[in-house]
Structure formats: structure tokens, C-alpha cells
């Protein structure tokens, strides 16, 4: 079979059982359910169990995607994990997942692009499949973001949660209408300081002296990030649609990065789309960074909201800054 296109053949997701509500948070920091709900739309988020690492969340999502695809783990050619909360600096979380699910024949590596990570990884996998180097790929977005949260900082601790989503990609030929189409990726490192975890890496290792100021937690200029997120996601979505020969009117469902309900509403307004075309689960999970889009994709697929032939728009924005958008025919 001559492969000319790539499509998603199956999805899976895994969210930890433990729920942290806004009322729970109001006992930890000076906040309220009313503030969090009106500013972000978030009502609760999931927290990984004691001893559960990002690779555990990722492996559970991967096994569900494999089951949906009717594939065995040793049939996988490539595993890419998008994460900013790897189990450790190395080996890659993808290698740990490989071991946990028994994907003995896959080549494995991680991608770091914060909340845009899953869409970046999707494009990388697509290049491998399109070039004929690999027949299939497992792409995972997985985060234990609560491991980077400063539970004393009300500006950030209310926003994030843990979870994982996965998609299995395969090469298809010209006769398949289901395929990935236009795709846009962008980065602006000059704005890196607006959203970062400054410490814990080689630039600022954690020491006894600096540990108390928690440099190894998420620091974010929320208002600035919000503005860039709306602008970049709208631009990326419009460019990816134009590349594909579609307009916003053709889109059956948008799966946007889930950071804030107000950002999703602003994107819908600018693209001229009704809110029912914007998939939203941020109220249940908060921002799970690279995991938001694959988790949403899986929930939409299992809820029957993705029909064969539908035009689906995925769009993300995150630390870096990074942004990306992909159009696909489901
Ligand atoms: N509870 C109560 N009050 C709070 C809380 C809280 N949890 N957090 C902040 N406040 C206060 C602030 O201290 C401030 O008070 P002040 O006016 O007295 O100084 C006031 O609320 C307003 O703060 P803002 O920052 O202006 O609030 P804003 O309406 O911008 O909402 C938010 C903040 C939710 C963070 C928003 O800016 C946002 O969603 N930003 C974008 C996040 C995002 O998209 N991230 C992208 C990717 S994330 C990634 O890559 C990992």
C-alpha cells in the first residue's frame, strides 16, 4: 500500500480517580468556588494517586487506545510522549511507557512543548508515517502537572490537574477520506518568561538555599498569557483551515486546549462559531497541559461526537510560547 496520508484510528484516555474541588482548594489558599468558576470555568480537577507517575497515566491511556484499535503493543512502531512532567530527566517517559505496555518494537522519545505538546507530537509522528519510515505511531499527551504546582500560590494552583490521553496514527492511501490535513505550528521563545518552571533544570538547580522559594513550580503571568493564547490560537486555526481549503463554517467540532473556558469562548467568538461546536471539559479536569487535547478527543469520540467525514479542528497554545493547529477529516 502506498501511504500518502495519516489518520487517527483510535484514541484512549485515563484520568486519575481522586477529585479536588474548588471548595477543597478554598481550604488551602485564599480563593473561592465563585472566583475560580467565573474566571476559569474550572469546577474540579483530578489528582494522581500516591506513587502514580506520568508514565502510569500515559500507559493506562495507551492501553485503552490499543484496545480501541484492536492492536497489540508489540505492533507499535513509534511512541512519542508529549509532557512537561516526565517521570525523570532521563530515560524518556516514552521509554518507560514502552516497558510498561510491552511495546518491544517501538522507537521512543519525548517532546517538550508544554500545552501544545500533543499537537507538536502529532505532527512529528505524521512526518515519520508520511515518509514511510514508520507504519504507525502511538502519540500520548500525559501530565502529572500537580507535581509542578505551588499549593501556596492561588494565582496558579487552582488551574492545573493530572491526566493522560493517547491516539494511534496509521498511514492510509488516497482512497481514505479520513486523514490529517492542514497543520500549523509556531513558537516565540522571546516570551518564555511569561509562563515557565524556572528551577530544577541546569539553569537553576534546586539547592537548600533556594528550595523555600519553590523555583521548581509553575510561574505564570496569567493576563498576558491569556491575551497571547486567544490571538495565537485564532491565527493558527484560521491558517490550518485555509491550508485545508475549509472555513470555520465547515467545522463540525473544535477541540481546543482546555486552559480556561473564557479563552475557549473568545476563540468561538472570533472564529464566528457557536459554543456547541467547541468541545469543553475544562470544568471537570482543569488544565492538564499536553493531555487536554487527546483526553478531549477521546471523550468526544466515545460520546459519538466525531462522525466519519466530519471536519475536526484541533488548536493549542502553551509555554514557550508555542502554538499549533491541525485540521482532520474524521
Ligand atoms: N482566587 C481569588 N483571587 C485570585 C485568585 C484565586 N485563585 N487568583 C488570582 N486572584 C486575584 C489576583 O490576585 C488579582 O487580585 P488584584 O486585582 O487584587 O491584584 C485578581 O484576582 C485578578 O487577577 P488576574 O490575574 O487579573 O485574573 P484574570 O481574570 O486574568 O484570571 C487567569 C487569571 C485565570 C490565570 C487567567 O489570566 C488565565 O486563564 N490565563 C491564561 C492561562 C493559560 O491559558 N495558560 C496557557 C497554557 S498553560 C501551560 O502551558 C502549562
Image (cartoon, grey):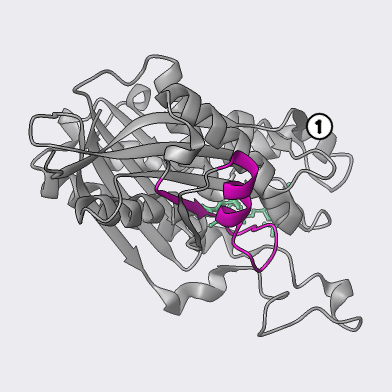
Residue 28 among those drawn in magenta = no
Mark 1 within 8 Å of ligand 1, using the beta carbon: no
Residue 259 visible in the current orientation: no
Q: Residue at x 34, y 52 (%)?
A: 125
Q: Position of residue 45 (x, y in %)?
A: 69, 35
39 in relation to 19, above or below: below
143 in relation to 60, above or below: below
304 left or right of 99? left
Q: Residue at x 33, y 36 (%)?
A: 268
Residue placed furthest toward the top: 304
Q: Position of residue 264 (x, y in %)?
A: 42, 39
**Could you tell me which quadrant the N terminus lies in?**
top left
Is disc 1 placed on a helix, strand or loop? Answer: helix
Residue on which the image places disc 1: 23
Q: Residue at x 57, y 48 (%)?
A: 98
Decide which of 147, 70 is in the foreground and name it: 70
Q: Which residues are magenta?
A: 77-102
Residue 82 among those drawn in magenta = yes
71 left or right of 50? left
249 left or right of 129? left
Q: Position of residue 121 (x, y in %)?
A: 40, 54
Q: Position of residue 197 (x, y in %)?
A: 65, 69
Q: Kindly indicate the quadrant of the structure image that contains residue 308.
A: top left
**Could you tell me which quadrant the C terminus lies in?**
top left
Residue 317 visible in the current orientation: yes
Amino acid at each position: 500500500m502506498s501511504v500518502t496520508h495519516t489518520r487517527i484510528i483510535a484514541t484512549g484516555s485515563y484520568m486519575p480517580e481522586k477529585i479536588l474541588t474548588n471548595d477543597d482548594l478554598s481550604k488551602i489558599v485564599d480563593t473561592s468556588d465563585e472566583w475560580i468558576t467565573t474566571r476559569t470555568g474550572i469546577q474540579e480537577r483530578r489528582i494522581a494517586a500516591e506513587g502514580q507517575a506520568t508514565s502510569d497515566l500515559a500507559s493506562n491511556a495507551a492501553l485503552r487506545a490499543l484496545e480501541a484499535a484492536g492492536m497489540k503493543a508489540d505492533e507499535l512502531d513509534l511512541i512519542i510522549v508529549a509532557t512537561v512532567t516526565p517521570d525523570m530527566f532521563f530515560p524518556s517517559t516514552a521509554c518507560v511507557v514502552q516497558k510498561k505496555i510491552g511495546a518491544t518494537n517501538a522507537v521512543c522519545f519525548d517532546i517538550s512543548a508544554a500545552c501544545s505538546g500533543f499537537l507538536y507530537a502529532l505532527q512529528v509522528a505524521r512526518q515519520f508515517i508520511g515518509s514511510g519510515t514508520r507504519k504507525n505511531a502511538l502519540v500520548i499527551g500525559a501530565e502529572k502537572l500537580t507535581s509542578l504546582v505551588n499549593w501556596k500560590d492561588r494565582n496558579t494552583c487552582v488551574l492545573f490537574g493530572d491526566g493522560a490521553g493517547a491516539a494511534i496514527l496509521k498511514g492510509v492511501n488516497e482512497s481514505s477520506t479520513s486523514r490529517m490535513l492542514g497543520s500549523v505550528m509556531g513558537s516565540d521563545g522571546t516570551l518564555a518568561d511569561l509562563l515557565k518552571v524556572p528551577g530544577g533544570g541546569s539553569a537553576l538547580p534546586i539547592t537548600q538555599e533556594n528550595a523555600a522559594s519553590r523555583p521548581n513550580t509553575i510561574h505564570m503571568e496569567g493576563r498576558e498569557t491569556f491575551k497571547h493564547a486567544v490571538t495565537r490560537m485564532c491565527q493558527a486555526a484560521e491558517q490550518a483551515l485555509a491550508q485545508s481549503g475549509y472555513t470555520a463554517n465547515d467545522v463540525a467540532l473544535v477541540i481546543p486546549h482546555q486552559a480556561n473556558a473564557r479563552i475557549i469562548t473568545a476563540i468561538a467568538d472570533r472564529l464566528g462559531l457557536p459554543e456547541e461546536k467547541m468541545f469543553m471539559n475544562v470544568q471537570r479536569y482543569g488544565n492538564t497541559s499536553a493531555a487536554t487535547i487527546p483526553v478531549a478527543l477521546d471523550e468526544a469520540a466515545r460520546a459519538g461526537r466525531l462522525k466519519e467525514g466530519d471536519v475536526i479542528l484541533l488548536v493549542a497554545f502553551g509555554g514557550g510560547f508555542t502554538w499549533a493547529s491541525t485540521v482532520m477529516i474524521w
